[in-house]
Amino acid sequence: MLNIVGESAGKVWEYLDKNGSASVTKITNETGINKNDVQRAIGWLLKEDKLLVETIGRTETLSLK
């Protein structure tokens, strides 16, 4: 499980680095990572202090620090 979460975190980071800020739904749809693994990856990246989470309206938007 740890390997899957680490790999997912890397893919999410790469996606945000290439494409800029995005919602969880957009990241899930465009990376092909399942939603649970995207959520775990977000936790990993937050723990490493690599993400900013902003709420715009009702949508949470993720971006890299």
Image (spheres, rainbow, N blue to C red):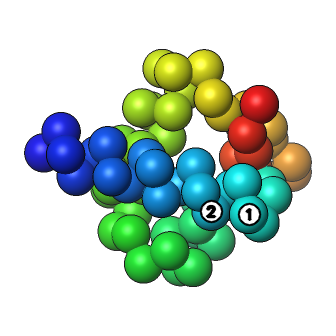
Q: Residue at x 51, y 21 (%)?
A: 48
Which amino acid type is shown beneath numbered disc 2?
Tyr
Query: Can residue 64 be seen by looking at this rendering?
Result: yes
53 on left or right of 56: left
Residue 63's quadrant in the figure?
A: top right
Residue in front for this viewpoint, 10 or 25: 10
Q: Residues within 10 Å of mark 2 (few under 14, many from 20)?
A: some
x then y, percent, for residue 22 = 73, 60
42 on left or right of 36: right
Q: Quarter of the image containing the C terminus?
A: top right
Residue at which label 2 appears: 15
x then y, percent, for residue 31 = 50, 74
Query: In the image, which disc is placed on residue 38?
Result: none
Residue at the far left in the pictured view: 1
Does residue 36 sit above or below 50 in this rendering? below
Residue at which label 1 appears: 18
Does residue 29 sit above or below 3 in this rendering? below
Q: Residues within 10 Å of mark 1 (few under 14, many from 20)?
A: few
